[in-house]
Amino acid sequence: MTTAEATTNAFGLTETHLEIREHARGVARKFVAPRAHDIDEAGEFPDDIRRIFMEQGLFGLPYDEEHGGTGTGTLALIIAIEEIAKVCATSALLLAVQELGSLPIKFAATDEQKSHWLPRLASGESLAAYGLTEPESGSDSAGMRTTAVLKDGEWVLNGGKRFITNAGVADVYTIFAKTDLEAGHAGISAFIVPADAPGFSIGKFEKKMGIKGSTTGELFFDDCRIPAENILGEPGTGFTLAMKVLDHSRPGVAAQGLGIAGGAIEYSGKYLLEREQFGKPIAYQQGLQWMLADMETRTVAARELLYRAAWMIDAGGVSRETLTKYSAMAKLACTDAAMAITTDAVQLLGGYGYIQEYPVERMMRDA
Ligand SMILES: Cc1cc2nc3c(=O)[nH]c(=O)nc-3n(C[C@H](O)[C@H](O)[C@H](O)COP(=O)(O)OP(=O)(O)OC[C@H]3O[C@@H](n4cnc5c(N)ncnc54)[C@H](O)[C@@H]3O)c2cc1C
């Protein structure tokens, strides 16, 4: 057992977790790494990688066996996202956003809706998206303007969403809208909107600094009609559901950050051994060794927090406040680590760090 395995096993990772890590690492190196540069350069959604994840069973990790998943839980998903993000943040986001868009259905859909959607999402045949943000409502969800009104046995949605990951490629959108304009947070409800719902359309796609193969776009609802049973839970419970989903899905985004950091350490560590200046590999310069040591220490510390948060989700029984705190701290630690470590990695490569032929500048933009 390597030191790294001994460290992570302090969490009591099971044989299944370790096997999933090996499997995801293999998929990442064999299929994803060779595509990462082109995905970034083309800025196109990598449907080929989605199909590989389907074949390799990666989408099913967080879903119950009853719904076509492997029943392996959140920590298993986190481990897989981390491995994929080491080589390609866009591809890792496929797994993280599938979970984000699915959780409202898992938590609040009827048994019929669950049986319809979850097996397709667990296989990867269908993709999900989560629509909360609007032009006038970012951090302040209560300011949303999209409305939903029950008319003749159908919900009729009007308004729009912005910055929605998987826009245009998702088959199902979990959408938050106001069913009571006067009630603030308590006036928000959640809905399942299939991509082919009448009155639903996709607007413009954003051009981004990084994670360029992932779509980020606008959604429009113009008298968009969905069946009455597509409401998730009771009217007015949408904000509570949205926050519960974020508590459970922040670890996925954290894992993406952690993987980016890990990938930057792996690449720059190898580079230091290969690049020679002053007649020897620059890895022999103690100042650079200190940088690498700090990068690794920060990543391991962030991983401890992240695995703890994921473990809390899988174990259950922790209070909502504790989970909110740990999932937010894990996301903060991992994504801040990603920024700091990719910046250091660019530095470690000298001028080459700034050149697109080397992956660390992409990792810095993705972070
Ligand atoms: C690539 C990408 C993908 C995304 N994917 C999705 C998605 O799939 N689904 C979805 O619903 N949304 C998505 N979003 C939207 C994202 O969740 C919002 O950008 C985020 O909630 C912040 O909202 P905002 O951009 O309007 O910033 P604002 O709310 O306008 O905030 C601007 C600044 O003010 C700060 N600020 C705001 N309020 C306070 C406060 N009370 N106290 C102190 N500081 C404050 C913020 O921290 C920020 O620094 C995505 C965004 C991006 C960029």
Image (tube, rainbow, N blue to C red):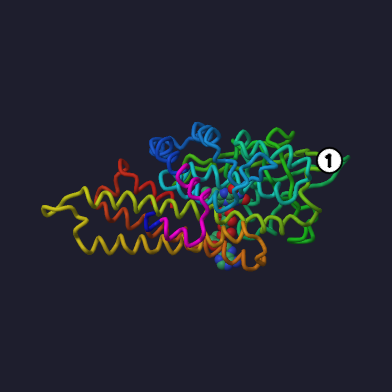
Q: Main secondary structure of the magenta part?
A: helix
Q: Between residue 128 and residue 180, name the one nearer to us.
A: 128
Residue behind label 1 places its C-beta within 8 angstroms of ligand 1: no
Task: Reply above or below: 243 against 165.
Answer: below
Q: Which residues are magenta?
A: 5-23
Disc 1 designates what residue?
Answer: 154
Residue 184 is a magenta residue: no
Examine the rendering and report whether any part of residue 162 can be seen.
no
Q: Quadrant of ligand 1?
A: bottom right
Q: Residue furthest left?
A: 279
Q: How many marks?
A: 1
Residue found 41% across the figure and 60% down from its top: 299
Q: Amino acid at mark 1?
A: Glu
Q: Between residue 365 and residue 8, name the one nearer to us.
A: 8
Q: Between residue 309 and residue 231, name the one nearer to us.
A: 309
Residue found 28% across the figure and 56% down from its top: 347
Task: Reply above or below: 106 against 293.
Answer: above
User: Looking at the picture, how far across and down is residue 124, in whole percent?
Assistant: 60, 36
User: Looking at the picture, how far across and down is residue 314, in whole percent?
Assistant: 61, 56
Examine the rendering and report whether any part of residue 310 can be seen.
yes
